[in-house]
Amino acid sequence: MRGRDFNDDDREASLPVAIINEAMASRYWPNQDAMGKRFHRPGEREYRQIVGIAKNANYQTLGESPRACIYVPLEQSFSDSMVLYLRTSDDPTQVLLAAQHVIHEIDPQMPIPDARTGRKIIDQALWTASMGVGMLSLFGLVALGLASIGLYGLLSYSVNQRQREISVRMALGARAEGVVRLVVGQGMRLALLGAALGVAGALLLGRVMAGMLFGVGAQDPGTFAAVVAVLLGAALLACWVPAWRAARVDPVIALRAE
């Protein structure tokens, strides 16, 4: 973000330097400019001078809290155990094979125990989260199905209980279409009220779950619209089917049955 990258002058005999991330800069030098500051790492005798500040990144797990990080040049802090990252616009699998071939040309004895593409690394890191999302999705679909069945049964029972009222309206001259429209309208008003309360509750719960999601929002309009459409569709059928059947029954026969 600021400062410079490492260069060929940053060698073992030169001034020890380091690049730190934003989290370390704000933690150890709050309200100050960390550029040019010096610090001492455990195990080292000399102080290192900060020559650059980098963005925060994920260093161990996805979604971790920002943590302080120090980058040092290889020439000044050699390690025989490291990871080589390659960026390419070609097929990563083919590049992996070519990179291993070049490394073995330099040193045939160099072990390469693990060679993976970036996509595979990300998929492995997200495996547990993907399984959790899959299970939650399954349970969500089951819950939606049960809610739809329960809603249908409740409204259907409520309309069937109004058989006598519908018969009286028909006997007094009401048209079947008008009676069905009245019953469906009353039932859908209740369903719409329930849907509005459900969406409001889901929005509030989404804020709580926002910290568990990465790269997506907790309020997905498409999902909300699909769930509301399914539940309102079940409510519409639950109101319309019994009302339509009741309106087709001869009022005299229905009243005698009562």
Image: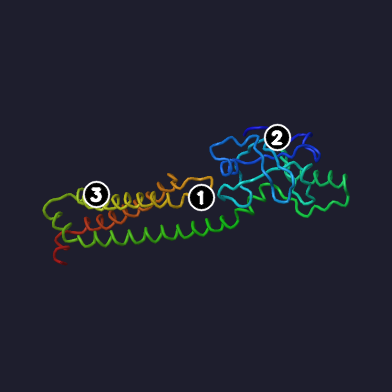
The earlier-in-sequence mark between 3 and 2 is 2
For the residue labelled by badge 2, is the local secondary structure a helix, a strand or a loop? loop
In depth, the one of 191 and 170 nearer the eye is: 191
In depth, the one of 145 and 181 nearer the eye is: 145
- The residue under label 2 is which amino acid type? Asp
Q: Residues within 10 Å of mark 2 (few under 14, many from 20)?
A: few
Q: Residues within 10 Å of mark 3 (few under 14, many from 20)?
A: some
The earlier-in-sequence mark between 1 and 2 is 2
The numbered dot on residue 213 is 1
Return the x and y of residue 170 as percentages of the image width and height: 15, 54
Marks 1 and 3, how far apart at CA: 39 Å
Indicate the quadrant containing the N terminus: top left, top right, bottom left or bottom right. top right
Marks 3 and 2, how far apart at CA: 68 Å
Residue at 77 percent of width and 43 percent of height: 76
Residue at 81 percent of width and 39 percent of height: 13
Hey, which residue is sitting farthest bottom in the picture? 257
Please name the residue that numbered disc 3 is placed on: 185
Does 171 sit left or right of 59 as displayed? Answer: left
